[in-house]
Image (cartoon, rainbow, N blue to C red):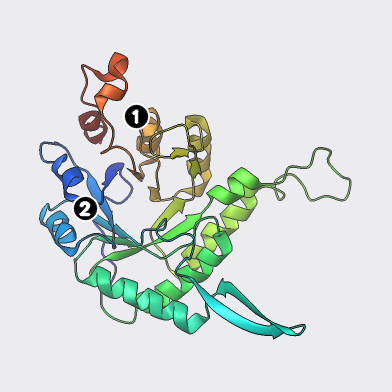
Amino acid sequence: MLITDGLDREFLPVFSLNDFRLLKRLDNLEGNYGILAPISCYPKLLHRIRERGKPFFIDSNIFKNYEYPWYQQLQCEFKQGRWIREYRLADENLLRQKVRDYLAKCDQFSPDYVFALDILGEPLLSLYLARLSWEEYWQKSRSYNLIGVVQVGYSLYNWAKPLIPQLDSLPPHYNSPKSFLGTLISEYRNIGYQHIALGGLLKLEKTISTGLRFGLLPHELDELLSWSRPNFVLGGLALGRVEVLRKHRVWADSTGWLWWDARYEPERFSQRNALQEVSAFN
């Protein structure tokens, strides 16, 4: 049975971590916040996070082994007189087994929320996996909620915009990422997901320490949240976006907050505890 709690529809900062040193940085942090960790962490770390008593989220570590991703398998085919070997999307049985293995690992650590398996930059394949994950999730009683991850970033950042409107083209409302993503999010809700996360919003950026940056300005995020109404924004937590996140009463995590140090920007933060400021906003 799905569980609900007072966090629903309230802003919640969530700090992402993957080692004990980063967890220790939360020792003296006051206020309500969540902790997110990938299932690939040491089991002892995941148990320690559970002992904190904070809202506990687990994800599948979407960035791991991206060169040979888990959802592909090597297939051989004899074509035009020679053998062709290439990686393709795995068949459904293998994908279901991957989902079962992932959920079984999550079961061991009693999280509050688990992110369904998804594929970075692949909105329709992620929807396919979301359906498989939902079906496998309900094969046994579980105490945590499954969060569906909608890959919105690729569509927002790569939508082809016609330079000159054509007489036979669809009206502007229909030829837009809003139309595509609105339908996509509805499909997740039709499957049964009561918790929706927006993913894929981080973009590669070699000039910053984390190698990733959030691709939307605050007013763009405000518009997106106004019509999409998610529960979670992956990678969206930052001081410049906190007011927007709080306005829409959503949860958001950051992959960089616990790595951040005030010495990086002494002119702005030498006299401030930015980590405490974020957690105090709710």
Residue topped by disc 2: 55
Mark 2: amino acid: Pro
According to the image, label 1 marks what residue? 239
Q: Nearer the viewer, residue 38 or 12?
A: 38
Q: Is residue 75 left or right of residue 45?
A: right
Image x and y of residue 25, in percent? 16, 39
Amino acid residing under circle 1? Leu
Residue at position x 32%, y 20% from top? 265
Horizontal side, residue 117 vs residue 30: left or right: right
| Quadrant of the frame with the C terminus | top left
Q: Position of residue 252 (x, y in %)?
A: 35, 44
Report the Cα–Cα distance between label 2 and label 1: 21 Å
Callout 2–callout 1 Cβ contact below 8 Å = no
Of the residues under marks 2 and 1, which one precedes in the sequence?
2
Q: Secondary structure at mark 1?
A: helix
Question: Between residues 249 and 22, which one lies in front from this camera angle?
Answer: 22
Q: Is residue 233 above or below residue 89?
A: above
Q: Position of residue 80 (x, y in %)?
A: 77, 82
Residue ID at (26%, 68%): 106
Tell me the tag on residue 79. none
Residue 278 picture quarter: top left
> Relative to 183, does residue 131 appear above or below in the rendering?
below
Above or below, 177 against 42 in this view is: above
Q: Is residue 118 above or below residue 205?
A: below
Q: Quadrant of the N terminus?
A: bottom left
Percent from the top left, x then y, of residue 37? 27, 54
